[in-house]
Amino acid sequence: MAITAEKAPYGKASATLTRAFDAPPTLVWKAWTDPKMMAQWFGPRDFTNPVCELDVRVGGSLRIVMRGPDGNDYPMKGVFLE
């Protein structure tokens, strides 16, 4: 896996993930777009996701709260641009 980084103005950064999975494309899509499935695997090992909300339309939102093994919550949010 190749990793590259560029500087971007605040609020203008984006991320692109590329990875090959030995699974049908429909299952991979569901794992990334179904909140119940995503909550089962997303985040670092030993973390849980008590909140996983996805609206995977252009302009839709993403809200995940990862809970660490230490009990601390790590919220994140975003907007789907395309």
Image (cartoon, rainbow, N blue to C red):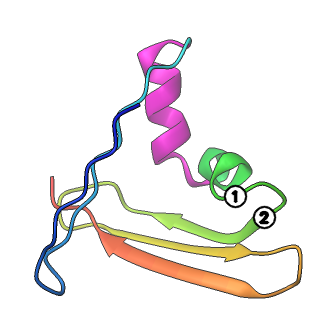
Q: Marks 2 and 1: CB-CB under 8 Å?
A: yes
Q: Amino acid at mark 2?
A: Phe
**Residue 29 colored in magenta in the image:** yes
Could you say where residue 79 lies in the image, as x and y percent from the top left? 27, 70
Is 3 drawn above or below residue 56 in the view shown? above
The quadrant holding residue 11 is bottom left
Q: Is residue 32 left or right of residue 49?
A: left
- In the rendered view, tell whether residue 12 sits above or below residue 37: below
Examine the rendered structure and indicate whether residue 32 appears above or below residue 57.
above
- Separation (CA) of disc 2 from disc 1: 6 Å
Q: Residue at x 13, y 74 (%)?
A: 8
Helix, strand or loop at label 2? It is loop
Q: Which mark is residue 47?
A: 2
Looking at the magenta stretch, what is its main secondary structure? helix
Q: In the image, which disc is placed on residue 44?
A: 1
Q: Residue at x 78, y 88 (%)?
A: 72
Where does the magenta region start and end?
23-35
Q: Residues within 10 Å of mark 2 (few under 14, many from 20)?
A: many
Q: Amino acid at mark 1?
A: Pro
Residue 11 versus residue 79: which sits nearer the camera? 11
Residue drawn at (63%, 53%), measured in percent from left and top? 42
Label 1, secondary structure: give it.
Answer: loop
User: Residue 58: where, in percent of width, then height?
Assistant: 18, 58
